[in-house]
Image: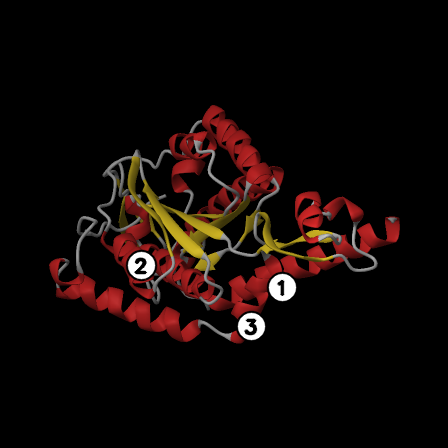
Amino acid sequence: MFAKKRSAAGSRLTDAAIGPELMARVKAIRIRTHKLVSSALAGGYKSSFKGSGIEFEEVRAYQIGDDVRSIDWKVTARKGEPQVKTFREDRQLTLHMLVDTGRSLDFGTRRVTKRELAAEFVGLVSYVALGTRDRVGLTLFGNTTGLHLASGRTSAHINRLIREVIAASPTDSRSDFVHILEERVRDRSRHSLMFVVSDFHGLLDATAADRDRVRSLLTILGARHDVVAVPLEDPFESQLPNAGLIELDDPVTGERLLLDSASRKVRDAWTENAKARRATLDALLERCRIGVIRQSTDGDIAAPIVRFFESRARGQSKASFVRRRKK
């Protein structure tokens, strides 16, 4: 996909080191995402995702109705009366953001660029997670794996996540989804909620063999974790404006393309190509059976997240009802 080129500073920098323009963008995203955290987002998040297991809570006296298998015989012998172990659900989640740093993310014709949209998404979801004391980590990737930040749960940590996404140096070649996903498959860390934030151009421009490999890897990850794809879009990519001659640069190859957007045939061909690419991505993600939250540079960032949480919560409630009926 052709797009405009923009520059970005390197990662692992403080606010003071990234320059006034980038610092202003980071500050604006912090303020915007913090304000967008609402009861609807927080409530939907809590009802949609659960921790990875149970943890010990206490030993107490046996009560009628307790499962005899939970009796702690050592404590029972010491106290002379039946004692049972009780457990509670481990509600804490670990979220992990896999964020694409390809040059195509520096494109945007509306409110923000796709890179800024990625930073907003990371910030918003992280602030919601902070409300339940969940931890959030970050891995940047392009043609190779970039910066990795271990999970944290402080406002300062979230601010750094936003800053790193905005300031990351864009990679000069297509983003390698096979490489980053193979790394995640090899990582045997506990169950997490994993967001793959990208425009997925690197995947759509990959070979059919690589796309098949990505589908396989996402399926494996989806069996271990809650995986959610977050496609980032700009309206220009699907709807070419009637603006006469337009010169476009491919941000990866440097190839230039001159289009006569006044031609209805050219505009229609542009739209059909975009539809075909979207259909290819939709089919791949559907086969992986993972969640999808689409984000657009001209849209309300919170609304798609709320809809996803609500849809997921309804699905869990239905599944729970079916299990109860079968008992």
From the image, state whether disc 1 or disc 2 is nearer to you. 2
According to the picture, the residue beneath numbered tag 3 turns out to be: 40
Q: Amino acid at mark 1?
A: Glu
Look at 54% across and 51% down and name the residue there. 292
Q: State the mark number for residue 310.
A: 1
Q: State the mark number for residue 196.
A: none
**Reading the chain from its start, which is encountered first: label 1 or label 2?**
2
Q: How many marks?
A: 3
Q: Nearer the viewer, residue 89 or 236?
A: 89
Q: Residue 179 in the image: x percent, y percent?
A: 38, 30
Q: Is residue 298 left or right of residue 39?
A: left
**Reading the chain from its start, which is encountered first: label 3 or label 2?**
3
**Reading the chain from its start, which is encountered first: label 3 or label 1?**
3
Other-residue count near label 1 (Cα within 10 Å), few / some / many at <14 / 14–19 / ≥20: some
* Alpha carbon separation for disc pair 1 and 2: 27 Å
Q: Are marks 1 and 2 in contact (CB under 8 Å)?
A: no
Q: Amino acid at mark 3?
A: Ala
Quarter that holds the N terminus: top left
Is residue 157 visible in the rendered structure shown here? yes
Look at 35% across and 44% down and name the residue there. 139
Other-residue count near label 3 (Cα within 10 Å), few / some / many at <14 / 14–19 / ≥20: some
Q: Amino acid at mark 2?
A: His
* Alpha carbon separation for disc pair 3 and 1: 9 Å
Other-residue count near label 2 (Cα within 10 Å), few / some / many at <14 / 14–19 / ≥20: some
Q: Residue 148 in the image: x percent, y percent?
A: 31, 43
Q: Residue 239 in the image: x percent, y percent?
A: 44, 56
Q: Is residue 299 above or below residue 252?
A: below
Does dot 3 land on a helix, a strand or a loop? Answer: helix
Q: Are marks 3 and 1 in contact (CB under 8 Å)?
A: no
Q: State the mark number for residue 157.
A: 2
